[in-house]
Image (spheres, grey):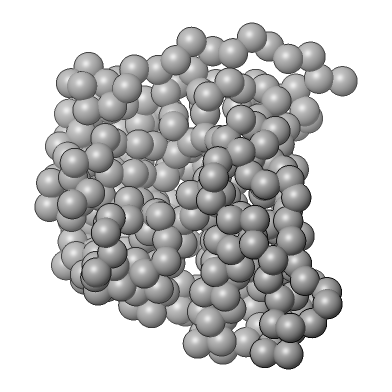
Amino acid sequence: MGAERPMRFALQLTAAENGAAWAAAARRAEADGYDVLSVPDHLGPQFAPLVALAAAAASTRSIGLGTFVLAVGLRNPGMLAKEVATLDVLSGGRVELGLGAGWSAREFAALGVPFPDPPARLAQLAEVVALLRAVWRDEEVAPPGSGPDGATGPDRLRVAPQPSRPGGPPIAVGGGGRSVLRLAGRVADIVSIATDNARRTAATGLDGVPGWDRLARQVEWMSEGAAGRAETPERNLRVLAVVAGADPRRAAAELSATAGGSVDELVASPFVLLGRPAEMVGHLVRLRRELGITYFTVSARHAGALGPALEELAAAGLRPAPVAPAPAVATR
């Protein structure tokens, strides 16, 4: 069960004013004790994920470098395998590759990329994960999308360099619906549980934010996919909001006024952290104890509110203490 794993935290960063500011933000995340620096994958005002992570790698010494999550339909799988392997080598084996089927039809259309129906996108996601695993074992494979005839053709795909770690970086598969979570349980090293994106067209609001019963069902779907595996995948939760305050209901009211959702929904949701540091710690410990969730991803805007809770977790021995910051790296 995932409850045996130590707690981990990823901080999601999106952009900075310039290279020096980005390097400073990466070093700050490392110094604050985050295990992973993650970057999302959208066309809006954010850095391109793999380029940004390469810059962060040069500015840090130990923090993991994650994508949360790359839409596989927007990238050639062979080039993705090569770029991720290169980043893994250059970073000393710190990459954590998050992948998803993609949910924004608008972004696919803006790039001139077809947006298939959900079953086809999930099939594509499964195919990409299988291809990455194979080429990171230094196997030759048929070109992506070549079909059965490609299996014996002359133009085979082989990736060099190979990743720093044998078999490649851990792969996280993220989503909120039953089909994608069952797939994630079957093929991923890490299952990233989010709200269901089936009707999502814009940034997540908190209206109708899921409760514990819904999250428990999502964990069940993941477990159905993982049945028979020798090792259960690590379970990750995308935290939607963190609001500190002496009174959780007052914190929820403050959040409701800006992000939607009723006070009762927010107080009862496992996707939201509210109140004093001890209350946040209790919430996180409950998630680990009841649902085996030990890995949490939060946005940079929530780092200040979450910081005291991370300190309490470290003091209680539930996660490692922060590392010393890396020396500054000059950025022209």
Q: Quadrant of the C terminus?
A: top right
- For the point 34% across and 74% down, the residue is 182
Q: Is there any visible trace of residue 266 in the rendered image?
A: no
Taking depth in this image into account, of 274 and 123 the one nearest to the observer is: 123
Q: Where is residue 79? Give x, y as percent.
A: 76, 60
Tell me if residue 269 comes above or below residue 76 in the rendering.
Answer: above
Tell me if residue 307 comes above or below residue 217 in the rendering.
Answer: above
**In the displayed structure image, the side of residue 238 where residue 217 appears, left or right:** left
- For the point 54% across and 45% down, the residue is 166
- For the point 69% across and 88% down, the residue is 147
**In the displayed structure image, the side of residue 38 where residue 156 appears, left or right:** right
Q: Where is residue 306? Give x, y as percent.
A: 35, 31
- For the point 56% across and 87% down, the residue is 120
Numbered circles on residues, count: 0
Q: Where is residue 163? Give x, y as percent.
A: 63, 44
| Quadrant of residue 278 within the rendered picture | top left
**In the displayed structure image, the side of residue 199 where residue 71 appears, left or right:** right
Q: Is there any visible trace of residue 35 in the rendered image?
A: yes
Residue at the farthest right position: 332
Taking depth in this image into account, of 228 and 95 the one nearest to the observer is: 228
Taking depth in this image into account, of 97 and 228 the one nearest to the observer is: 228
Q: Where is residue 65? Give x, y as percent.
A: 57, 38
